[in-house]
Each structure stands twice: as C-alpha cells, then as structure tokens.
Image: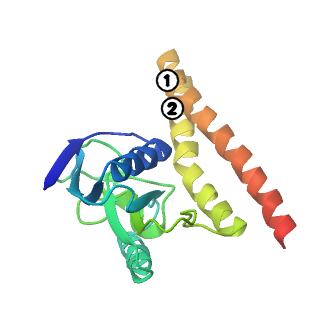
C-alpha cells in the first residue's frame, strides 16, 4: 500500500525530521519524494527513523558520493527539494556553495538541496555527524546561505530605501545569530574534546 502526502517544511529540517519520524511511528516508511510531497509504504510502526541534512552547498557529484557513502553504511537516502519551485529549465545562483554547485540547474543540484536518511531503529540515537568537529563544519556550511540572504536583502533595502526588505533581512539575521551561537558552542566542545 502506497500513500502520498503533500507537505512543505521550508527551511525547517527539525520539523521535517519530527514529522517523518511520526509517520514512521504510525507505520509508514518513506519510499520516494516528489516536488511537493512524500511517498510512503506500509511498515511495522517504529521500524525506521530519519535524519535530514542540508546538502545544497555540495556539487552534484559530492552529494551523490555522500549519499552512496551513507548507503554503504546500511542507510537508505532520498533527495528532496527545499523550495516549491516547479519551473523547468530554471537556474539558481548559490554563491555560498562549492565550486560545482554555484549555478544550480535541473541537471545538477536544483531541487536536491536536502538529503533524507533512513535507518532501521535500533535504540541508539540517530546522529549522522558524531564528532564536534564534524558538527562544527556542518554548521559553518549551513549558515552560509543565510549570510548571503541577509546581505542581499539588506543591500537592496538600503539601496532602494525600502523597508519591506528589512523583514527577510531581519529573519535571516535571527537565523544567523542562532547558528553563530551553535557554532560557538561547537567550537568550545571541540576544544574540550581535543
């Protein structure tokens, strides 16, 4: 039995992980993704659990290599889009990304910004990044888009003297501050663990 659920989480990976794990607890495991949704198949309740990682900064090759690495460890992986863009032939500029991902197109990393990882539930915590140094590198990578969004909206707001640009700039700044707190905590943790 297959079940498709249309749901969009925007940039909230935590909400997406929580929802996917709730679906798994109800007896549905992910079998695929679409632009606007998730395709599930029946399973035993609580049989699997999920983690979600942002891979939008990776080139197509690096993202595929990472997914294959995780699959080699026994996980299942699914790529998912971050936005709800249904355009064909679209090009997205990502100045914060790796060299091979700065121009994202349908053939590369466009609509493949998230990696959903599934593992069999074994009672152990599901954490893809286990060392403080790994989590620090991931947090530094994940904050880059927000810095660019803040800079773009702040500059546009100043140049155009338009206050509506301040709203997304302010929201991006809030996310940056949260990330910077997380990065400071991870730096301290990695120094302690050395």
Residue 68 visible in image: yes
In this picture, residue 130 sits left or right of residue 39? right
Return the x and y of residue 2 as percentages of the image width and height. Answer: 14, 54
Q: Residue furthest front?
A: 44
- Above or below for 171 versus 114: above
Q: Quadrant of residue 108?
A: bottom left
Frontmost residue, 23 versus 108: 23
Q: Quadrant of residue 130?
A: bottom right
Q: Residue furthest bottom?
A: 72
Residue at coordinates 59% horizontally, 61% vertically from top-left? 138
In which quadrant will I find the N terminus?
bottom left
**Dot 2: element:** helix
In which quadrant will I find the C terminus?
bottom right
Residue 87 visible in image: no
User: To which residue does mark 1 refer?
Assistant: 165
User: To which residue does mark 2 refer?
Assistant: 153
Return the x and y of residue 104 as percentages of the image width and height. Answer: 33, 58
Residue at coordinates 77% horizontally, 52% vertically from top-left? 185
Which of the colour schemes (rainbow, by chain, secondary structure, one colour) is used? rainbow
Does the residue at mark 1 contact the one at mark 2 (Cβ under 8 Å)? yes
Q: Give the mark nearest the N terminus, 1 or 2.
A: 2
**Dot 1: element:** helix
Residue at coordinates 80% horizontally, 60% vertically from top-left? 189
Frontmost residue, 37 versus 10: 37
Q: Alpha-carbon neighbours of circle 1 within 10 Å: few (<14), some, or many (≥20)?
A: some
Frontmost residue, 46 versus 177: 46
In this picture, residue 5 sits left or right of residue 120? left
- Above or below for 173 versus 157: below
Query: In whole angstroms, how far apart are the C-alphas of marks 1 and 2?
Result: 5 Å
Return the x and y of residue 106 as percentages of the image width and height. Answer: 23, 59
């Amino acid at each position: 039995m297959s079940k498709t659920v249309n749901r969009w989480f925007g940039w909230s990976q935590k909400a997406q992980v929580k929802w996917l794990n709730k679906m798994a607890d109800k007896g549905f495991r992910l079998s695929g993704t679409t632009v606007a949704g998730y395709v599930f198949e029946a399973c035993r309740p609580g049989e699997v659990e999920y983690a979600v990682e942002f891979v939008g900064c990776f080139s197509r090759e690096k993202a595929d290599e990472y997914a294959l690495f995780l699959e080699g460890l026994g996980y299942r992986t699914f790529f998912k889009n971050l936005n709800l863009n249904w355009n064909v032939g679209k090009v997205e500029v990502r100045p914060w990304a790796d060299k091979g991902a700065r121009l994202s197109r349908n053939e590369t990393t466009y609509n493949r910004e998230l990696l959903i990882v599934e593992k069999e539930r074994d009672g152990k915590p599901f954490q893809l990044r286990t060392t403080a140094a790994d989590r620090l590198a991931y947090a530094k990578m994940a904050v880059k888009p927000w810095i660019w969004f803040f800079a773009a909206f702040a500059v546009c707001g100043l140049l155009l003297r338009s206050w509506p640009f301040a709203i997304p700039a302010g929201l991006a700044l809030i996310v940056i501050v949260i990330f910077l707190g997380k990065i400071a905590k991870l730096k301290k943790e990695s120094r302690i663990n050395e």
